[in-house]
């Protein structure tokens, strides 16, 4: 490894690990990272020389404290050079501005609003499963995982059903394409879709999420073009790959662990607790920050503009916080995880995400008493900002 390392980084904190392409993330990424941590091969905070050089925060205690400390560790892209354009909101802003942006969309995500969506989520889950039931097999990621959150967004945004195919295709390119230029181009195309949707809401006001943003007020004024774009994009993208990947990891685990699955089929009342434990062991999203000014933290010198990559995917598996972290146990009294982040930016959609996974599992267990992963060996996964199984073939008996 002959990549440059800045002078302020001690050599013993440098670890050759590319968060996007590390082979450790190609299969069983959670297990692999936990084993690396437990064997002390990586410290809780290390420096990766890849991708221009950045810190990686793997330890849950360190991550929690730093994510809460937004005064030192900023979400503003000026300190946080790993953020990709088009910039999204409210995630790429700091309090106090962030508080004002976030307030605009909060009403759509409070438990009462999510409860009002439950019937729709149930019908949606049921119809996606029913369409495949008689076939006895599916490729879960493409046929369910990716379709489900797009449909949820269509509903929340008051967008017509006829937009579904275009959005599924666009999403596919924005999220799955191996080439970054193709992904970026799809991001901009998505931006055009969102801006056109705002225009339609201007002409015909509604009560949907995009209308809420359009009529929202930031520091006493309406949002400008870039702010509308940023908010609209994150509302679409924030709940997309994250939900789809979570569902895929959950189904991979249940397909490979029939004893656990049987517990859910026999007693669906444990599904809410099981969802929490499954998310603990299979969190998917990482989080970015930048250092606002030179500072020392946990005995480490951070310099202004140092980039920080938080592997919140493994915070629920930190043995300092969770006993026997690799064991999935639906009867754990609490399933501590930071899979939805921490601090002021903690995921606004977490209640919706949990509800989506819960209702999906309720509908799946009702229809499919047993299923398996239809290939032997490890399922390939990809690293990066959202860890995810690349494809997941499932099979179940058809009577
Ligand atoms: C399992 C699914 C999900 C996971 C793992 C997840 C994860 C996260 C994480 C880790 C953050 C913190 C980002 C940061 O600190 O910079 C976040 C923020 C956010 N998420 Fe989620 N998310 C999920 C589902 C959703 C859904 C369904 C929506 C909405 C439809 C959503 C919308 C957002 C938004 C708008 C933010 C920004 C909040 C802020 O900056 O104040 N997420 N999410």
Image: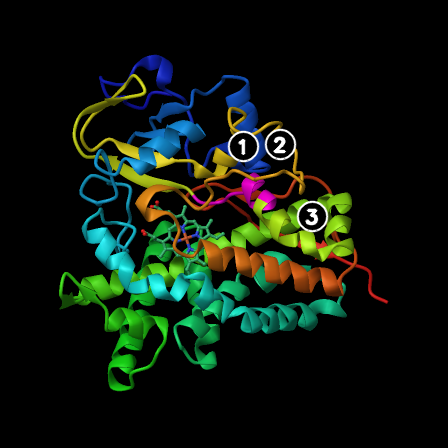
Q: Is residue 369 magenta?
A: no
Q: Tell which circle, 1 or 3, labels the residue nearer the N-terminal end.
A: 3
List the residue tagged with mark 2: 326
* Residue 305 screen position, x and y as percent: 20, 33
Q: Nearer the viewer, residue 306 or 278?
A: 278
* Residue 288 screen position, x and y as percent: 32, 40
- Asked if the residue at label 3 sits under 8 Å from ligand 1, the reply is no
Question: Would you say the residues marked 2 and 1 are in contact, meaning their CB atoms lie under 8 Å apart?
Answer: yes
Q: CA distance from mark 1 to mark 3?
A: 18 Å
List the residue tagged with mark 3: 254
What is the secondary structure assignment of the residue under circle 3?
helix
* Residue 103 screen position, x and y as percent: 28, 60
Q: Is residue 284 magenta?
A: yes
**287 left or right of 276?**
left
Specify start and end residues of the magenta stretch as a single range: 277-285
Q: Residues within 10 Å of mark 2 (few under 14, many from 20)?
A: some
Disc 1 or disc 3, which is closer to the eye? 1
Q: CA distance from mark 2 to mark 3?
A: 14 Å
List the residue tagged with mark 1: 317
């Amino acid at each position: 490894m002959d990549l440059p390392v800045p002078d302020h980084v001690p050599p013993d904190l440098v670890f050759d690990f590319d968060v996007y392409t590390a082979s450790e993330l190609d299969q069983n990424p959670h297990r692999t990272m936990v084993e690396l941590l437990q064997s002390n091969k990586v410290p809780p905070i290390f420096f990766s020389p890849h991708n221009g050089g950045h810190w990686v925060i793997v330890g849950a205690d360190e991550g929690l404290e730093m994510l809460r400390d937004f005064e030192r560790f900023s979400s503003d892209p000026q300190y946080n050079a790993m953020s990709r354009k088009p910039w999204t909101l409210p995630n790429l802003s700091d309090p106090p501005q962030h508080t004002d942006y976030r307030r605009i969309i909060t009403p759509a995500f409070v438990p009462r609003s999510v409860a009002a969506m439950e019937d729709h989520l149930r019908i949606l889950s049921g119809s996606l499963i029913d369409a495949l039931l008689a076939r006895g097999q599916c490729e879960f990621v493409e046929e369910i995982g990716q379709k489900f959150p797009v449909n949820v967004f269509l509903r929340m945004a008051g967008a017509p059903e006829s937009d579904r195919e275009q959005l599924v295709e666009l999403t596919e390119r924005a999220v799955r394409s191996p080439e970054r230029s193709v992904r970026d181009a799809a991001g901009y195309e998505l931006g055009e879709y969102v801006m056109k949707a705002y225009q339609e809401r201007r002409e015909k006001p509604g009560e949907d999420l995009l209308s809420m943003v359009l009529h929202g007020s930031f520091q006493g004024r309406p949002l400008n073009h870039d702010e509308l774009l940023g908010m609209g994009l994150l509302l679409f993208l924030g709940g997309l790959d994250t939900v789809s990947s979570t569902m895929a990891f959950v189904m991979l685990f249940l397909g490979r662990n029939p004893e656990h699955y049987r517990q859910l089929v026999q007693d669906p009342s444990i599904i809410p607790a099981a969802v929490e434990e499954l998310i603990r062991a299979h969190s998917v999203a990482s989080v970015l920050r930048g250092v606002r000014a030179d500072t020392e933290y946990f005995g480490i010198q951070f310099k202004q503009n140092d980039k920080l990559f938080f592997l919140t995917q493994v915070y629920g598996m930190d043995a300092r916080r969770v006993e026997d972290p690799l064991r999935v146990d639906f009867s754990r009294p609490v399933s501590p995880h930071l899979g939805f982040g921490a601090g002021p930016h903690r995921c606004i959609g977490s209640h919706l995400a949990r509800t989506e996974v819960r209702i999906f599992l309720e509908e799946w267990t009702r229809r499919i008493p047993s299923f398996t992963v239809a290939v032997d060996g490890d399922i390939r996964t990809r690293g990066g900002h959202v860890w995810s199984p690349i494809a997941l073939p499932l099979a179940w008996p058809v009577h």
